[in-house]
Image: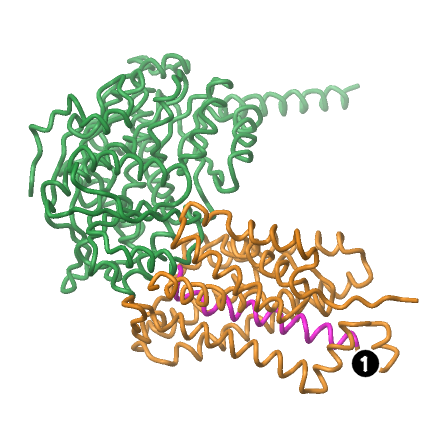
Chain colours: A orange, B green
Amino acid sequence: MSTLIAIAVDGAIHGAWLFLVAVGLTLVFGVMKILNIAHGNLYAIGAYAAATALGYWFASHPPSAAALAIQVGAALAAGLVLGLLLEVAVLRHLHGRDEVSVALATYALLLILDDVMLMIWGTDPQSAAAPYLLLGASRIAGMRFNNYEFLVMGLAILVGLLIWWVLTRTGTGRRLTAVIHDREMAAAMGINVRAVHVATFVAGACLAALGGAFTAPMIPVAPGIGAEIIVVTFAVVVIGGMGSIPGAAVGALVVGLARAAAVHLYPPAEVFIVYAVMAGVLCFRPNGLFPQAAVRRI
Amino acid sequence: MRRLSKITLAAAALAACLQAGGALAQEKLRIAVVTPLTGPLASVNVPGQNAARILAEAINAGTLPAPYSGRRGMGGAEVELFFLDENGGNAKQVSEFRGLAERRGADVVMGFGSAATCLAVAPVAEELKVLTVMSTCATPRIFEDASYEYVFRTTAHTTMDSAALALYVRQRLPEVRTVGHINPNFALGQDSWRDFAAAMKSAMPATRVVAEQWPTMGSGQYTAEISALAARRPDLIHTSLTGTDMEAFMTQMSARGLQEQSRIVAPLLELAINRMGRQIPEGIIFTARGTNGLFAPPSALNTWFTDIYRGRHNEMPVFTAYQYAATLLALKAAYDKAAGPAGARPATRDVIAALRSSTFEAPGGTIRMALGNGHQAIQDTAVGEFGFDRRANVTTVRNVTVFPAACVNPPAGARSEAWLRDGMPGADCSGIVNR
């Protein structure tokens, strides 16, 4: 019984973290039909920005809850600046191109941003563990869990609810949904599709950076972390259905639970369980668990 | 006509200059240092790169202390290092190794942090006949599964660490009955755990393995693994995680108090001590892959090395620094010996003959090329517990045991796995020292 509880808790923690990183990727794909391979770099830059800001802050201040505000601020600043820059300088010029060209362009961005990060931060990892140790621990089924991980879980739920609210309860969300379903018709109805694209990409960049900023206290931030996260993030998005926000949530939870089950019950499977689950889902539902409704033109 | 002859003269002079430049360039000994510059192993190999630069400068300037004092360069040649990123997978490394030899004119290749890379490039080095000296990678399989002429390793393999750690646990923690592990699912992790499990079975047959974890290298998230280990409550947990993986595990583990219910054995912990310092829980058992770093025996060479390293990088050198330094010192000793008193640039075959089965001094003590037909090094090693002196703000080591090389390395011709499994026959442990 305690093993099942541990799997549930570990799976939920891992799934929440994955959702935080993956939701921006699926949002951008849903609205802009861009498979942003550089999404992992936005996550990495968020992590670097947070680690750097936290390093400066804690060099002269004792550990405090201010760390959380710094993480959010660093992520939003990094996501806003980089999201705007990439959208205006690169992605805007790719509208109308075929998907392979766009994927290649974002792959080029991945390589360029990797080198930019190396130039700025070098090869030495950046550590910012203070927030991780700030919130203490809780006991569940006789095991100690770090409360910071529950904070990340809460943040993921908050982000999910916020996106759901924006999409279903606001005019912006309705315009966004219209663009998702048919951008030409949305443009014909007077929606500024370009502005929607800019806002969506910046929001996706901010979400990726937020994921990175809240990961930074758990791991040393080092070159290559963006490339490591992007593969599993793609798996989450593919399992859930490309472009589906609820799909990203369910996909992240499925991956988190599958990984936790493998770790607890059969550890050698950890290395491939995510991809086995993805292959299994695609066998029965080739468009993922929550595929976007396709418009049929007559 | 006169103008034409002036142009011809100028062209001839330019050609002569270029030729002379080429001749000078050829006199340099070009050493390619293949080392992780990016990825999870980058941070732990930076000290190695730092040490290589320090050693190359000192070799060229002739400022090395005894027993290397008084002779500049290697075999009379100035040393030139150039660095290449090891990250990116074996296929890339094999391809780049060919490029090193065929296009970039490397006389010697050294470095290599990953066991997988070492296993992949060793046959290529042999095929291309490029003198290749591995500095850090630790799998014993290189010289146990094959025989090489052009490939050497100037550091002991991981069997030494596992044997020493198991003997240390038997001596200092005889109450241990159950063991768990978390090791990265790649060559080093698999070798390290296989050897440690076999060594524990030999040293303490009553112990049993109750938890196994094989995280993917670079995963960084260990929440579930820590829960799984905590649930089984082993007396001892072995981990060969390294680099950013080790730091992430230490951060996440200590926040959840895993070290309070199990003793942790982390052979590669030393690589994290400069960066993590007081964040590392006290009492973790570790080695420095030889008598390196905090375990180094006092010597003029070690004092010179640590002083110059600390002065330049504001931290103590860790074992990767010692290993890269040892490689360059081994090469210097071999080149100088092969060059003879005349100091003429020796042929590669003469350098190989000089390096094979040699004994040389390094900052971490005496190293002997005793295994793998004289291509694989052994040296003394030590095990201790990590501590942090908060008053002096420095890392310390306590409860140290020093094991002679002959006690913890298999004899020539023996296979490591079988040697450990059979109870380490022939091990001479008469010189163990506790301090």
- The residue sitting at the bottom extreme is A170
Q: Is residue A201 magenta?
A: yes
Q: Please state the horizontal and vertical placement of residue A293, each as a whole percent of the image.
A: 76, 68
Residue B317 visible somewhere in the drawing: no
- Judged left or right of residue A27, residue B257 is left
Q: Residue at x 47, y 29 (%)?
A: B120
> Of B339 and A200, which appears nearest the observer?
A200
- Residue marked by disc 1: A191
Magenta stretch? A193-219
**Image quadrant occupied by the N terminus of chain B:** top right
Magenta span main SS: helix
- Judged left or right of residue A184, residue A238 is left
Please say if B370 is above or below B434. above
> Of A65 and B362, which appears nearest the observer?
A65
**Quadrant location of residue A248?**
bottom right
Q: Residues within 10 Å of mark 1 (few under 14, many from 20)?
A: some
**Image quadrant occupied by the C terminus of chain B:** top left
